Image (cartoon, rainbow, N blue to C red):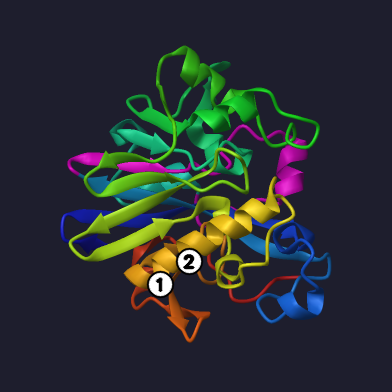
C-alpha cells in the first residue's frame, strides 16, 4: 500500500495455535467467545505478521516472526502452520530478498518476534538480513540477556547475541525517529523494554503495536490484557495513552497476532471506543494466512 512517500505491507511468517488462556488471561470465556471461539483443545489462531516499510530509500522490517531454528519441541508447542509461506518467502513475493533489508526493528525480543533475526547456515549462526542494522530498546536487551524463571522460555540469545557481537545492533533509550516517516516509541507493559512503531505521512498515521495489543480486542477493551504481560497494570496505562492518540489521529492500527482483524481504526464516541474496518485492508496483506473458522 502506497500513501504519499510511504509504502508498507503486512507480511506473514505463518499462523500458530495457542491456548486461549494466553491472549485472554483472566477474561471469562463467555465474554471472549464474542470475539473468537476456541477449538476443542481450547486453542485460538494467532498470526505472525511483520510490517515492511519503504521510507526515504530504506527498506525497514518490523519484527521477524518465529524463524527456522525451532526444534521438534518448539514446533509442537507453536503448532506452526506455514501453508501460505514463511516470512522470507512472503518478502520475496513483494520483491524483497533478505540482503535488501536495511533496518530490522524488533518491538521486543520474545522468540515469536525475532526468530528470523538469525539463521543457521553450515552449522553456523548468521544474520538472516546481512546488510541490516537491528534496532531494539536497551532495556529490552538487558532483560533478554538475563531472563528470569518466567521469561527464560521466550528469550533466546541465539536471536540477538551474535548480532550484538558483530556490531549490527543499535540500541535505543526511549523514543527515536528512524526516518522522517517512521518512529519507535516506548510502550512498556508486555515487557519493560517493549516498543511500538509509528508511521506518518502528510496527514495519515498508523501504529504497529506489537504485543502492546497483539489482537484487536486487546486495544478495544483496555482492561483485557494477555497472561504473557510482565506488568499488566502498566500495559493498561500505556494502552490508554495510545488509544487516545489513535482515535485523535484516525490512525490505522496494526494488530500483529490477530488472525481475523489485523488492521482497524479506533473510533471514540461519548467516551467509548469501537473498532472500524479499514477499507481495502486485504490489499496490504501479502499471501494472507487469515482464517474465518477454527479447524478441529
The residue tagged 2 is 243
Q: Foreground residue, 288 or 252? A: 252
- From the viewer's side, name the closer residue of 212 and 223: 223
Residue 202 position (above or below residue 169): below
Asked which secondary structure carries label 1, the reply is helix
* Magenta-colored stretch includes residue 76: yes
| Location of mark 1 (residue) | 247
**Number of marks in the image?**
2
178 to 80, vertically: above or below = above
- Residue 106, x across and y down, in percent: 47, 39
- Say whether residue 179 is left or right of residue 286: left
Q: Residue furthest bottom?
A: 270
Residue at the far right in the pictured view: 41
Numbered disc 2: secondary structure: helix
Label 2 packing within 10 angstroms: few (<14), some (14-19), many (20+): many
Q: In the rendering, at what x and y percent does residue 102 appear?
A: 30, 33
- In the drawing, does residue 103 fall left or right of residue 231? left
Chain part drawn in magenta: 56-85
Query: Looking at the image, is 271 positioned above or below residue 148?
Result: below
Q: Percent position (x, y) of residue 100?
A: 29, 35
Amino acid at each position: 500500500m502506497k500513501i504519499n512517500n510511504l509504502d508498507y505491507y503486512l507480511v506473514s511468517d505463518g499462523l500458530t495455535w495457542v491456548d486461549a488462556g494466553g491472549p485472554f488471561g483472566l477474561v471469562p470465556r463467555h465474554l471472549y467467545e464474542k470475539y473468537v471461539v476456541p477449538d476443542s483443545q481450547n486453542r485460538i489462531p494467532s498470526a505472525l505478521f511483520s510490517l515492511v516499510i519503504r521510507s526515504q530509500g530504506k527498506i525497514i522490517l518490523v519484527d521477524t516472526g518465529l524463524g527456522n531454528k525451532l526444534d521438534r519441541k518448539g514446533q509442537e508447542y507453536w503448532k506452526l502452520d506455514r501453508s501460505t509461506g514463511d516470512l522470507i518467502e512472503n518478502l520475496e513475493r513483494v520483491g524483497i530478498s533478505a540482503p535488501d533489508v536495511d533496518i530490522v526493528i524488533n518491538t521486543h525480543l520474545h522468540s515469536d518476534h525475532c526468530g528470523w533475526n538469525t539463521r543457521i547456515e553450515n552449522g553456523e549462526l548468521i544474520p538472516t538480513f546481512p546488510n541490516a542494522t537491528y534496532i531494539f530498546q536497551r532495556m529490552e536487551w538487558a532483560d533478554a540477556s538475563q531472563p528470569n524463571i518466567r521469561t527464560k522460555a521466550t528469550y533466546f540469545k541465539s536471536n540477538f547475541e551474535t548480532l550484538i557481537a558483530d556490531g549490527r545492533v543499535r540500541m535505543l533509550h526511549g523514543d527515536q525517529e528512524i526516518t522522517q516517516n517512521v518512529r519507535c516509541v516506548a510502550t512498556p507493559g508486555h515487557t519493560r523494554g517493549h516498543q511500538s512503531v509509528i508511521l506518518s505521512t502528510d496527514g495519515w498515521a498508523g501504529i504497529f503495536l506489537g504485543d502492546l495489543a497483539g489482537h484487536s480486542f486487546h486495544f478495544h477493551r483496555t482492561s483485557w490484557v494477555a497472561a504473557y504481560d510482565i506488568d499488566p497494570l502498566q500495559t493498561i496505562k500505556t494502552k490508554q495513552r495510545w488509544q487516545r492518540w489513535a482515535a485523535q489521529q484516525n490512525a490505522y492500527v496494526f494488530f500483529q497476532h490477530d488472525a481475523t482483524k489485523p488492521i482497524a481504526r479506533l473510533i471514540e464516541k461519548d467516551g467509548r471506543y469501537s473498532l472500524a474496518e479499514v477499507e481495502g485492508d486485504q490489499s496490504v496483506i501479502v499471501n494472507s494466512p487469515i482464517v474465518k473458522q477454527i479447524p478441529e
